[in-house]
Amino acid sequence: MPGTTPRRKVTLITGASSGIGAELARVFAAKGHDLVLVARNRDRLEALADEIAVPDRPRPLLLAIDLLAPSAGPEIVEALDAEGASVEILVNNAGFGLIGDTAELPLSEQLALIDINDRMLVETTLRLLPQIREAKGKILNLASIGAYCPGGPGMAVYYASKAFVLSFSLSLGHELRSQGVGVTVLCPGVTRTGFQERAGFTEATGLMRSKGPSARQVAEEAYAGLMAGKREIVPGIFNKILVFALPFLPKSMILSLLYGAQQTRRESP
Ligand SMILES: NC(=O)c1ccc[n+]([C@@H]2O[C@H](COP(=O)([O-])OP(=O)(O)OC[C@H]3O[C@@H](n4cnc5c(N)ncnc54)[C@H](OP(=O)(O)O)[C@@H]3O)[C@@H](O)[C@H]2O)c1
C-alpha cells in the first residue's frame, strides 16, 4: 500500500532456547539476520539474546510462548504485527521425543508430541506463509534421520511424527517451488542436546555420547544447505551413508535393530 512503512524482514526460530534451535539462532545472528526467537523459557531466551545481540542492530524479539497453547499461532502473528515485522525465513525447530513402548507411555504426552512436532509445525507454517511468500523466503523444518526409517519401535510416535515432517516438507516444497519459496527439511542423527533428557534416555548409553556432529555443526550445515536451496539435509557423513543404505536393508531387520537400541537407551543404569 502506498505510504505504508515496509515491514522489517525477520527470521523466526521456534525452540530457540536450547540445543539445535539455540545454535541455529547463533548462526543466523552471525550472518546478520534479524531474529524472532520462540520458546517457553524466557530466561534462556534472554540470555541467548544478550549473547547474540549486536550494537546498531535490533535486539532479537523474544516470544516466551507455549506452542502447545491453542492461542500460540495467533499470538505469534499478533506479536509480529505489533513489531512491524514480517517473516522471511521460518525455522520450525521446536519438538521433543519420548522413549518407551507406545502402549505404556502416557497418552497425553504422546498427543502433545504430535501437537508440537506436527500440528504446530503445520499451523505456524500456514499462518506465516503469506508473509514468507511475499518475501520469496524460506522454510526450514526439523525432521530427523528417523524419518527415513520404516518405523521406530521404542519411539514409535516420535519416528512417525518425523516421517510426517519429512513428507509434508517435500510436498510443500514442491507446491511452493514455482512461487519462489524454498522448503528445506533438516534430518539430524543423534545430536547431544536437551533432547535426550526430555525423551527419557539414560545417561550411561553410548548413544548419549554420540560422536556425530555437534548441535553447532548441525546448525552450520543446515544454514549452508538452506541458503543453497537444498531440499533435504542429513548432517554428518555416517548419517548420509545410513540414509543411502536404509532402502536396501530388510524392514524387519531395521525395526529389530532400532527396538534393541531404544531398549539399551532406556535400561542402562
Ligand atoms: N537432538 C537430537 O538428537 C535430534 C535428532 C533429530 C532431530 N531432532 C529435532 O531437533 C529439534 C530440536 O531439538 P533439540 O535436540 O535441540 O532438543 P532441545 O535441546 O530439547 O530443544 C527443544 C526446543 O524446543 C522447545 N520447546 C519444546 N516444547 C515447547 C513448547 N511446548 N513450546 C515452545 N517451545 C517448546 C524448547 O524450549 P522450551 O523448553 O524453553 O520451551 C527447546 O528450545 C526437535 O524438533 C527434535 O525432534 C533432534
Image: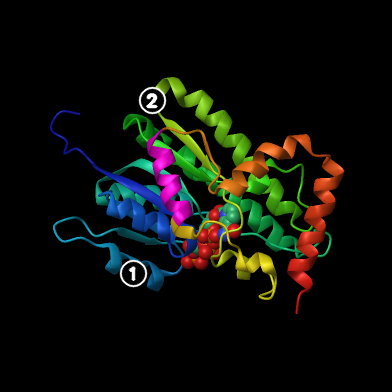
Under mark 2, the amino acid is: Gly
Question: Is residue 224 inside the magenta stretch?
Answer: yes
124 to 53, vertically: above or below: above
Q: Is mark 1 within 8 Å of ligand 1?
A: no
Q: Are marks 1 and 2 in contact (CB under 8 Å)?
A: no
Q: Is mark 2 within 8 Å of ligand 1?
A: no
Under mark 1, the amino acid is: Glu
Number of the label disc, if any, that sits on residue 46: 1
Q: Nearer the viewer, residue 196 or 75?
A: 196
Q: Main secondary structure of the magenta part?
A: helix
Q: Give the quarter of the figure containing the C terminus.
A: bottom right
Residue corresponding to mark 2: 180
How many neighbours does mark 1 have within 10 angstroms: few (below 14), some (14-19), or many (20 or more)? some
Q: Nearer the viewer, residue 69 or 15?
A: 15
Using the rendered view, name the quadrant where residue 197 is placed: bottom right
Task: Report x, y in % for residue 29.
Answer: 30, 54
Using the rendered view, name the quadrant where residue 38 is placed: bottom left
Mark 1: secondary structure: helix
Q: Earlier in the sequence, mark 1 or mark 2?
A: 1
